[in-house]
Image (tube, grey):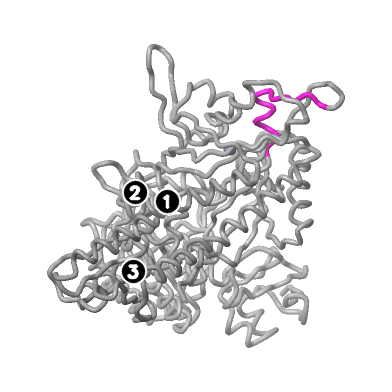
């Protein structure tokens, strides 16, 4: 028998006779870790606890790192294993089900895992509790997750026999010579999967199925339609309960529901998914966003430009969008032998403005800003209210500058973002630096040297401001590295809004120039930046952040005038007209309802101030003021109310107190 030297992390080590499973070896080194472990890494490679240390490790030394609960890696194993449990339950309940894929989700705030299935009869929401119950039954039987290694041909035969065409397709495309398949023993489930998984179903105690959605096989609308079952899993029931509670809070704030209830916007099937209709009340908020932004742009030396929604196809070829961005562009359209494409970005148009004249270094930086409406061919399954849409308006800008000033321009963009987001009530930020990275999966334009220069400029800009950031590998734009700013909302969720991108490629592709101090032509650097990101998405985030109760300056309806009896209707109209004349958004409720009903209605609409008017107010020319959170705040003259309301609006106060 051969001996293996096994070491636990960087700590204790022992000689053990092989072959021995990782689980047993762990037990000899640390009983507690062995009991806790969900899987392990052996010399850096993730394996199941049932993995055997044998011939391969013969006579050598092995380092074992247990994958433990309360780690991201552990959560990944737990959730992925729960996805298998889900598939097992579905197969058990609905024989003949075809399985797609079932990954863990760690970044998605809404879900923890999913499995794509085609069941003999389409599932409904009512099936979810039934499936979840079956999952619990299977879990309680403490069945083992068992791995088997077979040849590719055997695997193909196995899944053909089981009539699993999608799995066969995956094996055909992805498998090497040998294939690992996983069983949950004594269940009908087998999967083609690399693992690792938990050793047995007993480890899965806190999970919940959440929802059902449509999905396409491989995300391709031309391929079979599937159903996606979403769920989540945690290490403890307490964690799951806390998460469900936060989710409930998030649902109360759901911008799609509030958008309907407060009459802010709609997205209608008849007009197309992902295309937003802004109603007057949503439009009022948008106007405030735009007005604030335009004021700031003027102060910060931006020129406002306007450009068309379509351009000749060749332009998108020159810009590289057609080569690098084609999958989200709408198809070309033709007129008199010329092809046009609708814009997914505004950049080439601003380049056109820059190129329309010669520039000297003295004119730079040139900052062009546009509320530019773009269109992207997002798949229907990825659309989500205002957060992910097909038509949206970016608060876009492009800055053309010299290499000497690029750092200062980036600093200014970042500070502009903080000021803007702060004005709308966001105080906590997270900054990410997205770079090309070492192992790139995407197509990137430009040389190593250029990428390094771009990254250095962004890093210098952030360090000069003492800003902490996280580095994200392989997350850059195809033309350059970028800084992304996420905001934390009222219930602690992060939303990606601002992006500041460094670009040396488009100036090259479009042969942009400026005349330098040396009287010779030079290439400018281009910065792309959007601060709100898109007006639609920011609006969605704003609705959820405030749960629809907007501060006075943003509220679509700022004052509701509520007469107690018909006798004061005329006075109510007079008060409303006076406030409207002073620039406030006001409505009078002249319905023949009790005052209580009128107040309730305004309260539901989250109107910041209600003016309750009776005979006495009319006689004295006063208003009785109610604030939506505080209730009665007393009687005052119209003039006094106007002054108070004006102060809240002008200072863009975030609370009415
Ligand atoms: Zn798996
Ligand atoms: Zn751009």
Q: Which residue is mark 2?
A: 278
SS of the residue under disc 3: loop
Classify mark 1: residues with Cα within 10 Å, few (<14), some (14-19) or many (20+).
some
SS of the residue under disc 1: helix
Asked if the stretch drawn in magenta spans residue 430, the answer is no
Q: Position of residue 221 (x, y in %)?
A: 35, 41
Residue at 63%, 83% in the rendered image:
33
Depicted 356 relative to depicted 506: above or below = above
What residue occupies the far top of the structure in this picture?
Answer: 336
- Is 463 situated left or right of 282 in this image? right
SS of the residue under disc 2: strand
Q: Which residue is mark 3?
A: 606
Q: Position of residue 375 (x, y in %)?
A: 43, 38
Looking at the rendered image, the quarter that the N terminus falls into is bottom right
Q: Position of residue 311 (x, y in %)?
A: 47, 24
In space, the residues marked 2 and 1 are separated at their CA atoms by 9 Å
What residue occupies the far right of the structure in this picture?
Answer: 518
**In terms of depth relative to the viewer, which is nearer, 69 or 307?**
307
Please name which of the two marks, 3 or 2, marks the residue nearer to the observer.
3
Residue at 52%, 71% in the rendered image:
492
- Is 161 situated left or right of 592 in this image? right
Instruction: Name the quadrant containing residue 603.
Output: bottom left
**In terms of depth relative to the viewer, which is nearer, 66 or 255?**
255
**Which one is earlier in the sequence, the residue at label 2 or at label 1?**
2
Span highlighted in magenta in the image: 503-516
Classify mark 3: residues with Cα within 10 Å, few (<14), some (14-19) or many (20+).
many
Judge whether residue 316 can be spotted in this image: yes
**In terms of depth relative to the viewer, which is nearer, 107 or 128?**
107
């Amino acid at each position: 028998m051969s001996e293996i030297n096994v070491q636990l992390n960087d700590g204790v080590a022992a000689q053990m006779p092989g072959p021995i499973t990782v689980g047993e070896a762990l037990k000899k080194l640390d009983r507690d870790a062995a009991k806790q472990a969900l899987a392990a890494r052996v010399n850096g490679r993730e394996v199941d606890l049932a993995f055997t240390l044998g011939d391969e490790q013969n006579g050598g030394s092995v380092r074992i790192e247990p994958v433990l609960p309360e780690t991201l890696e552990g959560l990944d194993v737990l959730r992925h294993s729960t996805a298998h449990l889900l598939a097992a339950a579905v197969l058990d309940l609905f024989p003949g089900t075809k399985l797609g894929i079932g990954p863990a989700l760690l970044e998605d705030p809404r879900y923890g895992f999913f499995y794509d299935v085609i069941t003999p009869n389409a599932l409904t929401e009512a099936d979810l509790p039934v499936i979840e119950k079956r999952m619990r039954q299977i879990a309680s039987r403490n069945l083992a997750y068992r791995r088997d290694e077979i040849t590719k041909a055997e695997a193909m035969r196995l899944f053909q026999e089981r009539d699993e065409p999608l799995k066969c397709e995956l094996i055909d495309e992805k498998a090497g010579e040998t294939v690992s398949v996983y069983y949950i023993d004594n269940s009908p489930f087998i999967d083609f999967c690399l693992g690792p998984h938990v050793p047995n179903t007993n480890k899965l105690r806190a999970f919940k199925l959440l929802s059902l959605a449509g999905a396409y096989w491989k995300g391709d609308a031309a391929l079979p339609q599937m159903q996606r079952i979403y769920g989540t899993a945690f290490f403890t029931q307490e964690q799951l309960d806390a998460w469900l509670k936060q989710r409930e809070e998030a649902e109360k704030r759901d911008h799609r529901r509030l958008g309907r209830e407060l009459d802010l916007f709609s997205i209608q099937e008849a007009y197309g998914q992902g295309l937003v209709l802004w109603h007057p009340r949503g439009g009022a908020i948008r106007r405030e966003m735009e007005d604030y932004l335009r004021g700031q742009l003027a102060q910060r030396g931006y020129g406002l430009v306007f450009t068309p929604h379509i351009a000749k196809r060749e332009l998108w070829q020159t810009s590289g969008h057609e080569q690098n961005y084609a999958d989200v562009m709408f198809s070309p359209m033709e007129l008199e032998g010329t092809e046009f494409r609708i814009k997914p970005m505004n950049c080439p148009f601003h380049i056109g403005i820059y190129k329309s004249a010669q520039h000297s270094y003295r004119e730079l930086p040139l900052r062009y800003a546009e509320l530019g409406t773009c269109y992207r061919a997002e798949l229907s399954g990825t659309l989500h209210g205002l957060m992910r849409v097909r038509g949206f308006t970016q608060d876009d800008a492009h800055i053309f500058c010299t290499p000497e000033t690029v750092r200062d321009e980036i600093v200014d963009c970042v500070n502009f973002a903080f000021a803007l987001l702060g004005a709308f009530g966001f105080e906590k930020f997270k900054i990410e630096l997205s770079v090309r990275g070492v192992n790139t999966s995407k197509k990137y334009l430009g040389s190593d040297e250029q990428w390094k220069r771009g990254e250095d400029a962004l890093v210098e800009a952030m360090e000069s401001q003492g800003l902490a950031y996280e580095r994200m590998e392989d997350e850059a734009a195809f033309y350059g590295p970028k800084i992304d700013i996420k905001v934390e909302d009222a219930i602690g969720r992060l939303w990606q809004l601002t992006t500041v991108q460094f670009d040396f490629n488009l100036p090259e592709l479009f042969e942009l120039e400026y005349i330098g101090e040396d009287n010779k032509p030079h290439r400018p650097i281009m910065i792309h930046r959007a601060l709100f990101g898109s007006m639609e998405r920011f609006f969605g985030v704003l609705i959820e952040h405030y749960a629809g109760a907007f501060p006075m300056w943003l509220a679509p309806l700022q004052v509701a005038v509520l007469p107690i009896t018909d006798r004061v209707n005329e006075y109510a109209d007079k008060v409303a007209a006076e406030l409207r004349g002073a620039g406030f958004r006001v409505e009078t409720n002249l319905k023949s309802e009790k005052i209580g009903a009128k107040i309730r209605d305004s309260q539901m609409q989250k109107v910041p101030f209600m003016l309750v008017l009776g005979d006495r107010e009319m006689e004295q020319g006063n208003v009785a003021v109610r604030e939506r959170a505080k209730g009665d705040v007393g009687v005052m003259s119209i003039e006094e109310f106007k002054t108070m309301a004006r102060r809240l609006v002008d200072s863009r106060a975030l609370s009415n107190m």
